[in-house]
Image (cartoon, coloured by chain):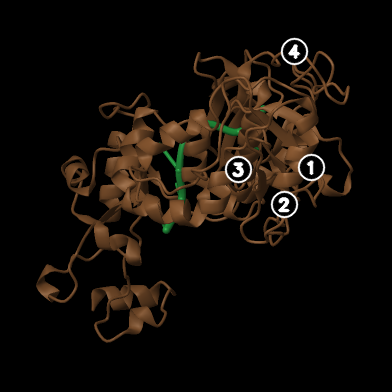
Amino acid sequence: MYIKMATLANGQADNASLSTNGLGSSPGSAGHMNGLSHSPGNPSTIPMKDHDAIKLFIGQIPRNLDEKDLKPLFEEFGKIYELTVLKDRFTGMHKGCAFLTYCERESALKAQSALHEQKTLPGMNRPIQVKPADSESRGDRKLFVGMLNKQQSEDDVRRLFEAFGNIEECTILRGPDGNSKGCAFVKYSSHAEAQAAINALHGSQTMPGASSSLVVKFADTDKERTMRRMQQMAGQMGMFNPMAIPFGAYGAYAQALMQQQAALMASVAQGGYLNPMAAFAAAQMQQMAALNMNGLAAAPMTPTSGGSTPPGITAPAVPSIPSPIGVNGFTGLPPQANGQPAAEAVFANGIHPYPAQSPTAADPLQQAYAGVQQYAGPAYPAAYGQISQAFPQPPPMIPQQQREGPEGCNLFIYHLPQEFGDAELMQMFLPFGNVISSKVFVDRATNQSKCFGG
DNA sequence: TTATATT
């Protein structure tokens, strides 16, 4: 009864709160099933929470701790209403954080002041985070601040921003060595404060040593962050990396497998054994599905948000641009990942594969490799071997009958004409010597040539 | 020059 009345008094009444049992709050949805929470049904055992209870976000949790391990730590501060470790929706992988709601608001406040950044759980190198979950507050209030002087401290940044509102958090982004990356996050109590800071400070000054004036803007949304990560990853491995093929073709299968293999996956990932491609694929399988894996064209990436257009991937629509055929060694890694551009030996078409002296300068998505390089090793070595660790019985991602020549004799060819098949490919290269095998990669869905092969 | 996570 108390709850029902309190709920109504608070103006929060909805259908749920007026349901037959009078319970105004229902914790979580499916998520709480695995968590620690009350068992509905027996009134005498139903824990009730304050109508103004605070849902806390707990961060920096070792991935080997689950709800029952965490419970004792937090019970010190009061009766727990709900405790849920966050897990990846597909892989089940522990995300290293949790949500915690106490029955009483006061318990949450006590826990926050006693624990937030006050201790570090075993195996973590940052202190535990205990603070109201994002869902508890509304609106964009976190700013990204760029073009700071690398010497500036959190206090310096606070001083710069405090005039515009109450700063809840201020963090300088630092590399592993502790050096500032010249940017920071500043979180205000409200959106209005954040906006005021943007209006007053963005572009207002240039810090010593910075290459342009101060940047003050709302921090990236999730979607933007994901896009950024994909771009970075794409740049690191190169969009022509043949390793992309198995993931593209078997993405759905891999995804299903990953659910079954969640535990193994998690431990492998924690151990750091997955290569970037595999880790990327595991983490971003969802997003990857929307991508055309050959990297030339991309499906429109959710142009739903009214915000800024996601940069990068969709921009260079190469297919309409005729490109010279390129021939490249299968190294399993993109050329730029090998450090120096590999042997600039023979270029069949005379076009240099890289922008002169500056392989890193160009947009990786626009780097159309064209040239001949030696095959550094067996096909698909790097990732195939390691993926096997995560997939004990990997699907036949690579045609087993595909023949591979001796080391140094295998070539990766791209920018093939659409109509090229295996035979044409072989024909083209026969004049240069005995061809053991030729294979043009074909999109399984469309049966269209992907315009590259080996 | 966008982090260690936010059902």
SS assignment at label 4: loop
The disc at residue A225 is 3
Judging by the rendered image, the residue that carries numbered circle 4 is A209
Question: According to the colouring, which chain is green?
Answer: B
- Name the outermost residue toward the bottom: A20
Q: Amino acid at mark 1?
A: Leu
Residues under labels 2 and 4: Cα distance?
Answer: 50 Å
Q: Amino acid at mark 3?
A: Arg
Kindly report the distance in space between the C-alpha atoms of the residues bearing marks 3 and 1: 34 Å
Q: CA distance from mark 4 to mark 1?
A: 47 Å
Q: Position of residue A263 (x, y in %)?
A: 29, 44
Residue A376 in percent (x, y) is at: 59, 20
Q: Is residue A339 or residue A78 the one in the foreground?
A: A339
Q: Gap between marks 2 and 1, in whole Å? A: 9 Å
Classify mark 2: residues with Cα within 10 Å, few (<14), some (14-19) or many (20+): some
Chain ID, brown in image:
A
The earlier-in-sequence mark between 2 and 4 is: 4
Query: Which residue type carries mark 2?
Result: Ser
Write down the residue under mark 1. A416
Q: Earlier in the sequence, mark 3 or mark 4?
A: 4
Chain letter of disc 2 in the image: A
